[in-house]
Image: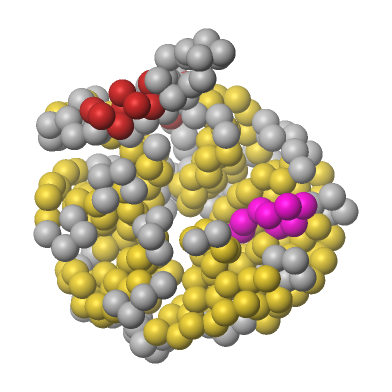
């Protein structure tokens, strides 16, 4: 299914991309999904109908359910994360599975389907996959047996080892031979040596560490607390904290998008019963901060398009049917709005 959403607006970028190869290399036509925007739809709990939509920013077409379209079977899981590693795209489901597709055509390469519980995110290092997982729930719904699963090939297969970590590991990032893990419940950053598959060091941090990102040549960690958000950066030669900055942003949800210039957009929510939601904006390397940059209700995901310099915010619409996406410019003005799948929660810009 396709929909024409808006006129082409990235022609110059796409033309430049087509001729980016050196003269000594044969030109390879772009695959259908190598440009544009991938929209991650989480799916509904109990239905496990998570899927990926593709927005072609050259033609304006929105193609739905591309995993099922290209592989002849549904994804059949609750999509938690999408990770691009070279030509492989990893689709992580928090229902205990990872599907691996060719990022050019979305054809299946492999999967990790056994011995995972509540998988959250993934990174690659030393030719291996590292998958953060809450582990099985205890009778009181705690997660005392959280771990990072190791798979010995980039194309999936069996879990070869589970590295115990602090409760509720979330995002990860790889640097050199190490993997940094955000331990959200206990406020820890655990550093795994990818070659020995052991925890090399643990750093205690404040709040609930949620997301790693790179800006200005450094690795940053985004952590949330009830009355503030905290940004950490690291000395990567000895894995110590380099900077710690606090900002008075309340009710942050952990969802964040960061521009290449270091401008951060963070989702906030008052929660039940009012769900007064918003986007706070701040400059990591400057004085700008706007606590109420954009307001609304039902916000569920956010992303930043570095080419068009636009912000994508998704709305779950209370999981009553499909969700929607609103595109904003950097002044917070709405540019477009369109319907997507169930529970849209993330974006990948290519």
Percent position of residue 53, x then y: 33, 36
In which quadrant of the rendered image does the N terminus lie?
top left
Image quadrant in which you'd find residue 180: bottom right
Residue at the extreme right: 196
- The reply to whether residue 245 is visible in this rendering is yes
Percent position of residue 59, x then y: 20, 25
Q: Is residue 134 above or below residue 46?
A: below
Q: Is residue 250 above or below residue 182?
A: below
304 or 74: nearer the eye?
304
- At x 69%, y 35%, the residue is 154
- At x 68%, y 71%, the residue is 235
Give left or right: position of 326 versus 129: left
Magenta region: 170-179
204 or 119: nearer the eye?
204
Residue at the extreme top: 26
- The reply to whether residue 136 is visible in this rendering is no
Image quadrant in which you'd find residue 72: top left
Q: In this view, does 142 lie above or below 115?
A: below
Percent position of residue 100, x then y: 57, 33
Percent position of residue 55, x then y: 28, 34
Q: In this view, does 61 lie above or below 278?
A: above
Give left or right: position of 266 versus 28: left
Prevailing secondary structure class for the magenta stretch in the rendered image = strand
Count the numbered circles shown: 0
Image quadrant in which you'd find residue 333: bottom left
303 or 162: nearer the eye?
303
- At x 13%, y 35%, the residue is 6
- At x 48%, y 51%, the residue is 80
In which quadrant of the rendered image does the C terminus lie?
top left
Is residue 181 a member of the stretch shown in magenta? no
Give left or right: position of 261 versus 315: right
The colour scheme used to paint the residues is secondary structure
């Amino acid at each position: 299914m396709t929909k024409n959403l808006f006129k082409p607006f990235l022609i110059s970028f796409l033309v430049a991309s087509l001729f980016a190869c050196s003269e000594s290399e044969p030109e390879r036509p772009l695959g259908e999904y190598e440009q544009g925007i991938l929209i991650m739809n989480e799916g509904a709990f109990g239905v496990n109908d998570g899927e990926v939509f593709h927005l072609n920013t050259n033609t304006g077409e929105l193609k739905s359910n591309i995993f099922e379209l290209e592989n002849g079977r549904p994804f059949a899981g609750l999509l938690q994360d999408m990770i691009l590693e070279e030509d492989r795209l990893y689709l992580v489901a928090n229902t205990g599975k990872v599907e691996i597709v060719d990022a050019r055509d979305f054809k299946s390469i492999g999967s990790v389907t056994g011995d995972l519980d509540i998988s959250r995110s993934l990174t690659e290092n030393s030719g291996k996959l590292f998958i953060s997982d809450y582990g099985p729930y205890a009778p009181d719904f705690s997660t005392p047996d959280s771990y990072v699963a190791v798979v010995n090939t980039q194309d999936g297969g069996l879990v070869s080892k589970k590295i115990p970590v602090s409760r509720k590991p979330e995002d990860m990032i790889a640097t050199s031979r190490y993997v940094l893990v955000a331990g959200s419940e206990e406020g820890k950053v655990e550093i795994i040596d990818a070659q020995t598959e052991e925890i090399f060091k643990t750093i205690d941090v404040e709040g609930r560490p949620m997301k790693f990102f790179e800006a200005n040549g450094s690795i940053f960690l985004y952590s949330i607390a009830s009355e503030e958000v905290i940004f950490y950066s690291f000395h990567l030669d000895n894995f110590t904290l380099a900077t710690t900055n606090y900002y008075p942003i309340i009710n942050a949800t952990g969802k964040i998008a960061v521009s290449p210039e270091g401008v951060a957009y963070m989702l906030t929510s008052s929660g039940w019963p009012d769900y007064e939601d918003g986007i706070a904006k701040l400059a990591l390397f400057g004085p700008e901060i706007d606590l109420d940059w954009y307001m609304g209700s039902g916000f569920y995901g956010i992303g930043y398009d570095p080419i068009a310099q636009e912000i994508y915010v998704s709305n779950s619409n209370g999981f009553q049917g499909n969700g929607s996406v609103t595109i904003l410019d950097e002044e917070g003005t709405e540019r477009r709005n369109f319907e997507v799948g169930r529970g849209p929660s993330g974006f990948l810009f290519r």
